[in-house]
């Protein structure tokens, strides 16, 4: 089955996730393509190049993964990197000295560090604004601004970006708009369909889904932009290894069923936490009370992802006790996997923020972030209740 | 000269710390998906890693002679040499046992290696074994052709005919074997009756539940002694590894485990890891396989070009009542016949599907399709095929986890050819 005779539009997301890029090996009929560890490929003749020459430039296992992702994102092409950070770095290398990045104020700390500590050395400036405020974005765009960078679902407020509106703003200003869609996943949200130029994922999270491979991806809808990004990737070399490409492809086959199951459990937990006497606030876009709910519904439909945060009515150490006392939820950063994870942003993912900034971004001492895995709702609920019961007030 | 173990005793030192396995199931049994993700794994793994590291080591070192002595004296439970055990094997065996509701599980390099491992351990010259005749033909062939050379006698009786099975039992009978459901007719066996025959004669029972999986059927809950799976199918679930497993009580499996260490039909660390990884989505995948199987079977039954559908979830299936009583769902495998079609017209339907691919096997995320006449029964005489119930117009479809709407649209198109 080739991409040409297997209509992308007629098949649903889940079916494409299993079949596109998973073409039967013509040499052996193998139903799962072989993993190509070869670093180099024999060429048809001197100066005559085959489809693959050297594994940094192209590898069949990586190509297969990239064609799956391109189909799932609705893009012309996709690129796989060794990590999500390598993928973001590739995007920033589109810029030149004097250019500016305008980014959301709640972007991932790793992206913040890249923009402020690495890009600045190349003479690229960064401005941060609240990306949920369209007027603030419009006001902050300057002639030097060349890239808007945001996260489709912000962390830890679970804020939702108005992708169609920001895309329009970017188009009008002639600026590229890139988003990190790690929390959204292409199963639930496809930013290219809403006019975004570049969609990025930390594939380590939902795409891989099993906490066992690092990876990053980019997908774009424009051929010229794709060629520019490919040129940078090939020139700088942060490509994803064949084994991780294989594990990612394997994970993507269950992406849709995983994310929808995780979303359903996350919503049940959010509703349960909302009525819990020890919980003062729950942030989850699937809840009607969430400020981004109607926008999330419009962009994502009926499923809202597996990450939620809540404010536990306790001090820093009582909150830490909850996070350390769960038996199913594992105390760890990262997210998006089959195993449920729990963390305290104030002491873990956002510990490097200044205390004042933590308050400004709503990272209270009682804030707890859950990444909901595939365990049943009842088991996770009982686990949380048990952990809360261990706290002495 | 060999030093006798009784001559030496190891010093009492602190043993290697064994981190606690995932806590024992609480009063309310954990959900199947929770078990799929967590059961059997160490809660705290080396380096705090969330997933089990892949141990490619073929051998495992001892820090001192004393440590070795503690091991050989049975004081420390640990690895020694890859053929006798591996941490990835332990981890996935514990998960499989938990899912099956069994005390113990033994993983092999393939499903055939698993049944061979069990039978070689349990049967001796002069013993007899009785199969229901719809069991996997390679299993029956192994007994009838190969165990026969070692003096084991194999009987085959009509599937589901407990009177015939009872009549074939004698004082030399050591094992009763069936599949449930069977392949490709999806016949389901009344496990209470099956176990009753075994118990009344003191004969052990074996069920190959590959098509059911522990998600849909747990034969041990019915008193079956051994459960066999080709883990290549639903348990691995991604069409990318071969594996087999036998589940049962620790005591009954002890000799089986020891024999595997001698025969060496172990699986590789890489496959064991992929199997454990595949099992994380086991419950989730089975829900989709069950849903797809049911919806596609209903679609086929209503299609004018389809003559007959074999799917235990359909009321029209002869085993429906048994299946409905003892199974949670009915899996992804469907067999059907094309109305008024010869073998060639039937193969045109197979060739016209764009999603399902022509291949043997089942249970993976990708749908597979085959015509038993051409695939597994090509070398059988027409008389034998008739006896086995394999008609020229028969198609076997193993539904993957694609969207049911896509599979139905694809079949609708293929049937219109």
Image (tube, rainbow, N blue to C red):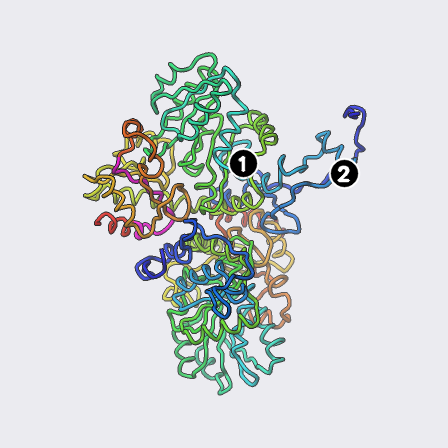
Q: Sort mark 1 into few (<14), some (14-19) or many (20+) by Cα contacts within 10 Å.
A: many
- Outermost top residue: B171
Along the viewing direction, whichever of A26 and B127 lies nearer the viewer: A26
Question: Does the magenta run of residues contain B406?
Answer: yes
Per the image, label 1 sits on a secondary structure element best described as strand
Label 1 chain ID:
B
Question: Does the magenta run of residues contain A89?
Answer: no
**Tag shown at residue B107:** 1
| Residue A24 x %, y % | 40, 52
- Outermost front residue: A46
Residue name at image x 45 percent, y 55 percent:
A252
Along the viewing direction, whichever of B293 and B155 lies nearer the viewer: B155
Label 2 chain ID:
B
| Residue A7 x %, y % | 32, 60
- Disc 1 to disc 2, C-alpha distance: 31 Å
Magenta extent? B392-407
Q: Quick check: B370 above or below A117? A: above
Q: Sort mark 2 into few (<14), some (14-19) or many (20+) by Cα contacts within 10 Å.
A: few
What residue sits right under mark 2 in the picture?
B14
**Residue A268 makes an appearance in the image:** no
Q: Is residue B266 found left or right of A195 in the rendered image?
A: right
Name the image quarter holding the N terminus of chain A: bottom left
């Amino acid at each position: 089955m080739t991409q040409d005779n297997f209509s992308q539009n007629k098949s649903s997301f889940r079916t494409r996730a299993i079949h596109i890029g998973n073409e039967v090996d013509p040499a052996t009929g193998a139903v799962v393509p072989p993993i190509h560890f070869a670093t180099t490929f024999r060429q048809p003749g001197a100066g005559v190049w085959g489809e693959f020459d050297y594994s940094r430039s192209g590898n069949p296992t990586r190509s297969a993964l990239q064609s799956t992702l391109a189909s799932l994102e609705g893009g012309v092409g996709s690129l796989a990197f060794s990590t999500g950070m390598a993928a973001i770095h590739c995007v920033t290398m589109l810029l030149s000295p004097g250019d500016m990045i305008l980014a959301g104020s709640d972007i991932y700390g790793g992206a913040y560090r890249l923009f402020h500590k690495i890009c600045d050395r190349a003479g690229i400036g960064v401005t941060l604004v609240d990306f949920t405020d369209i007027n603030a974005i419009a006001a902050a765009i300057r002639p030097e601004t060349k890239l808007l960078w945001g996260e489709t679902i912000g962390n830890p407020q679970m804020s939702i970006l108005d992708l169609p509106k920001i895309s329009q703003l970017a188009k009008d200003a002639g600026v590229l708009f890139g988003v990190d869609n790690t929390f959204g996943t292409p199963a639930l949200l496809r930013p290219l369909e809403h006019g975004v130029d570049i969609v990025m994922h930390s594939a380590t999270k939902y795409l891989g889904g099993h906490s066992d491979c690092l990876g990053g991806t980019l997908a774009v809808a424009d051929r010229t932009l794709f060629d520019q990004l490919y040129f940078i990737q090939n020139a700088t070399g942060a490509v994803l290894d064949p084994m991780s490409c294989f594990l990612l492809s394997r994970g993507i086959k269950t992406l849709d069923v995983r994310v929808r199951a995780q979303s359903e459990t996350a919503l049940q937990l959010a509703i349960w936490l909302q009525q819990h006497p020890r919980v003062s606030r729950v942030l989850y876009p699937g809840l009607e009370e969430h400020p981004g709910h109607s926008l999330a519904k419009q962009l994502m439909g009926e499923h809202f992802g597996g990450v939620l945060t809540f404010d536990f009515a306790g001090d820093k150490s009582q909150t830490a006790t909850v996070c350390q006392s769960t038996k199913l939820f594992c105390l760890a950063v990262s997210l998006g996997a089959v195993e449920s994870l729990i963390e305290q942003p104030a002491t873990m993912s956002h510990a490097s923020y200044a205390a004042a900034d933590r308050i400004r971004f709503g990272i209270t001492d009682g804030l707890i972030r859950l990444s909901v895995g595939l365990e049943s709702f009842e088991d996770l609920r009982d686990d949380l209740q048990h952990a809360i019961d261990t706290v002495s007030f | 000269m060999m030093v006798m173990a009784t001559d030496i005793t190891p010093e009492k030192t602190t043993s290697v710390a064994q981190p606690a396995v995932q806590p024992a199931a609480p009063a309310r049994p954990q959900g199947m998906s929770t078990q799929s993700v967590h059961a059997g794994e160490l809660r705290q793994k080396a380096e705090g890693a969330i997933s089990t590291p892949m141990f490619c080591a073929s051998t495992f070192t001892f820090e001192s002679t004393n440590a070795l002595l503690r091991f050989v004296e049975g004081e420390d439970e640990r690895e020694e040499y890859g053929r006798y055990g591996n941490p990835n094997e332990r981890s996935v065996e514990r998960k499989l046992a938990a899912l099956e509701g069994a005390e113990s599980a033994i993983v092999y390099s393939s499903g055939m290696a698993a049944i061979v491992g069990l039978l070689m351990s349990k049967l001796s010259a002069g013993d007899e074994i009785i199969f229901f005749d719809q069991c996997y033909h390679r299993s029956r062939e192994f007994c009838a052709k190969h165990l026969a050379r070692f003096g084991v006698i194999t009987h085959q009786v009509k599937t589901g005919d407990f009177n015939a099975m009872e009549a074939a039992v004698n004082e030399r009978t050591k094992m009763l074997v069936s599949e449930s459901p069977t392949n490709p007719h999806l016949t389901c066996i009344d496990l209470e009756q099956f176990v009753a025959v075994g118990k009344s004669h003191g004969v052990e029972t074996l069920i190959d539940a590959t098509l059911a999986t522990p998600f849909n059927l747990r034969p041990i809950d019915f008193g079956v002694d051994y459960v066999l799976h080709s883990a290549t199918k639903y348990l691995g679930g991604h069409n990318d590894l071969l594996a087999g497993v036998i589940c049962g009580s620790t005591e009954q499996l002890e000799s089986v485990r020891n024999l595997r260490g001698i025969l060496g039909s172990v699986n590789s660390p890489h496959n064991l890891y992929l199997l454990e990884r595949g099992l994380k989505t086991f419950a989730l995948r089975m829900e989709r396989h069950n849903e797809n199987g049911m919806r596609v079977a209903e679609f086929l039954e209503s299609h004018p070009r389809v003559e007959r559908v074999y799917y235990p979830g359909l009321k029209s299936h002869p085993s429906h009542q048994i299946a409905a009583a003892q199974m949670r769902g009915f899996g992804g495998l469907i067999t059907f016949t094309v109305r008024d079609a010869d073998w060639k017209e039937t193969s045109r339907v197979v060739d016209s599907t764009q999603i399902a691919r022509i291949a043997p096997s089942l249970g993976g995320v990708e749908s597979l399709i085959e015509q038993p006449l051409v695939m597994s029964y090509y070398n059988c005489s027409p008389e034998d095929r008739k006896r086995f119930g394999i008609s020229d117009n028969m198609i076997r479809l193993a539904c993957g986890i694609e969207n049911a709407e896509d599979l139905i649209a694809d079949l609708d198109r293929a049937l219109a050819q």
